[in-house]
């Protein structure tokens, strides 16, 4: 059968491929396998088609060539000024048509090329990038760098708010760290993201940035995560960073608020609908930042039958441990007989390691009084952290033990962990 290739499509072009098995539309990628044609589908997934089965390749649209000329943008000087801090992630990426993967925008000014819509609401005073990392590669040292950058913007009277772009996988860790590092804020610090790069038709990046721009000029002086609220691209949720968690690996509405309602919903036309008045409001006073951290803390997720020997390692090398227990905060205790954690917990605590308990259920709270397992753990010295999220507890423990005035005093560490500093603990659990 005669094969037909029209107009010599190149890498990056949108094409229609007819094979003996199917018809596929997508973007042509550079293939490492010479016998395959590699196509990126509109879903974002890549598919290989054996070249010997291809009957026809039709060019639908040529790729737009990248321009090296300097990009300029007209900004309205009457609009409120904000700062943008870029740290990486899908929202700061674009497709590399040679590999089919996404890669970071190498020049911060490229940001406006992909997201010009946000300039309808704000003007950008500073756009900086202290580093570009996938969020799974971030660590507490990076949190400190971000906090130092944000501190400059918090002290700039002209800047109305800050937007931080970040990868999704550990965004809630960074949001929690910034909450403790930055203290009581005088203006919004908005963390946003995208699950899908701007090159895709289903990208959430533009709506998330528009909504973030609106919230950056709002009265909400909190560290918040702003992102898609539903599958219909209608609005974004505004969630306290200290209450947020990534609950889905791929859906655009990935972040949910736990044990507290989101602060608000925000629409692309500027409308804000508040649902929770428990937030700090904008002021003229500069915040008192407190940027410190101790990395010798750990989070252990308990699972059935887990060998308690793991506590031996952590108690020798770490000052504090957060356990993500079952139900109301349980691990195997003496009643189970096999693999009881009681002995190892008592030994670790007697050797100076502080152990705290959270729950894997995320919604709801720990309670040592309901079941005997909880009472045994409490009597052994485990401290139950109410409805604090496990990741929040980990970051808070690192921040608390990072202070010299508390570090050597277990009672002060426990007291600070049980103190509701920024809304990480609720007096009463919110029923959904």
Image (cartoon, grey):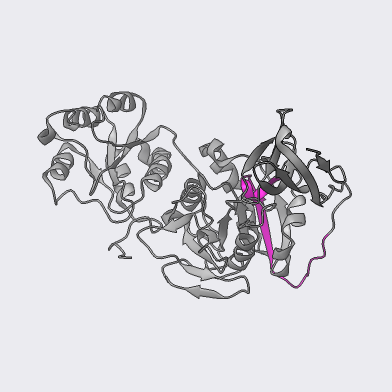
Which residue is at the front of the view, 202 or 46? Answer: 46
The image position of residue 14, as x and y in percent, is: 76, 49
The residue stretch that appears in magenta: 73-94
| Residue drawn at point x = 83 percent, y = 42 percent | 5
| Residue drawn at point x = 36 percent, y = 25 percent | 317
The image position of residue 97, as x and y in percent, is: 74, 41
Q: Is residue 91 left or right of residue 113?
A: left
Q: Is residue 139 left or right of residue 38?
A: left
Which residue is at the front of the view, 343 or 31? Answer: 31
Q: Is residue 166 left or right of residue 431?
A: right
Q: Is residue 334 above or below residue 420?
A: above
Q: Is residue 10 visible?
A: no
The image position of residue 262, as x and y in percent, is: 44, 65
Q: Is residue 227 above or below residue 282?
A: above
Which residue is at the front of the view, 420 or 42? Answer: 42
Which residue is at the front of the view, 388 or 16? Answer: 16
Confirm whether the magenta stretch covers residue 41: no
Confirm whether the magenta stretch covers residue 83: yes
| Residue drawn at point x = 50 percent, y = 44 percent | 170
Q: Is residue 233 left or right of residue 299?
A: right
State which quarter of the image contains the N terminus.
Answer: top right
Quadrant of the image occupied by residue 161: bottom right
Quadrant of the image occupied by residue 215: bottom right
State which quarter of the image contains the C terminus.
Answer: bottom left
| Residue drawn at point x = 13 percent, y = 48 percent | 371
The total number of labels drawn is 0
């Amino acid at each position: 059968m005669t094969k037909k290739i029209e107009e010599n499509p190149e890498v990056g072009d949108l094409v229609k491929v007819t094979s003996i098995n199917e018809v596929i539309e997508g973007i042509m990628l550079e293939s490492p396998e010479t016998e395959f044609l590699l196509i990126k589908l509109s879903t974002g997934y890549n598919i290989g088609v054996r070249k010997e089965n291809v009957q026809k390749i039709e060019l639908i649209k040529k790729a737009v060539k990248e321009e090296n000329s300097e990009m300029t943008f007209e900004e309205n000087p009457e609009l409120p000024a904000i700062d943008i801090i870029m740290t990486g992630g899908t929202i700061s990426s674009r497709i590399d048509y040679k590999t089919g993967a996404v890669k970071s925008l190498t020049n911060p000014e490229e940001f406006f090329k992909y997201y010009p819509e946000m300039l309808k609401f704000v003007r950008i005073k500073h756009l900086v990038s202290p580093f570009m990392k996938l969020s799974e590669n971030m660590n507490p040292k990076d949190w400190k760098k971000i906090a130092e950058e944000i501190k400059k913007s918090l002290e700039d009277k002209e800047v109305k708010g800050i937007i931080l772009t970040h990868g999704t996988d550990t965004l809630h860790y960074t949001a929690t760290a910034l909450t403790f590092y930055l203290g009581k804020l005088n203006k919004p610090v908005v963390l946003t993201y995208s699950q899908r790069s701007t090159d895709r038709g289903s990208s959430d990046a533009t709506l998330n940035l528009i909504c973030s721009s609106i919230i950056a000029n709002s009265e909400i002086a909190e560290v918040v995560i702003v992102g898609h609220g539903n599958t219909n691209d209608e609005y974004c949720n505004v969630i306290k960073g200290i209450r947020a968690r990534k609950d889905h690996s791929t859906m655009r509405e990935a972040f949910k608020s736990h044990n507290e309602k989101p602060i608000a919903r925000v629409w692309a036309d500027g409308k804000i609908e508040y649902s929770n008045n428990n937030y700090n409001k904008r002021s003229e006073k500069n915040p008192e930042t407190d940027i410190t951290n101790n990395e010798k803390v750990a989070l252990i997720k308990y699972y059935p039958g887990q060998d308690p020997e793991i506590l031996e390692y952590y108690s020798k090398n770490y000052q504090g441990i957060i356990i993500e227990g079952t139900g109301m905060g349980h691990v195997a205790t003496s009643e189970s007989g096999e693999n009881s954690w009681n002995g190892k917990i008592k030994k670790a605590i007697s050797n100076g390691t502080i152990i705290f308990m959270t729950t894997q259920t995320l919604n709801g709270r720990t309670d040592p009084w309901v079941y005997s397992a909880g009472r045994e753990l409490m009597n052994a010295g485990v401290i139950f952290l109410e409805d604090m999220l496990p990741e929040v507890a980990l970051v808070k423990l690192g921040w608390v033990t990072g202070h010299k005035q508390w570090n050597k005093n277990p009672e002060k560490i426990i007291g600070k962990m049980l103190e509701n500093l920024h809304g990480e603990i609720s007096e009463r659990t919110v029923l959904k």
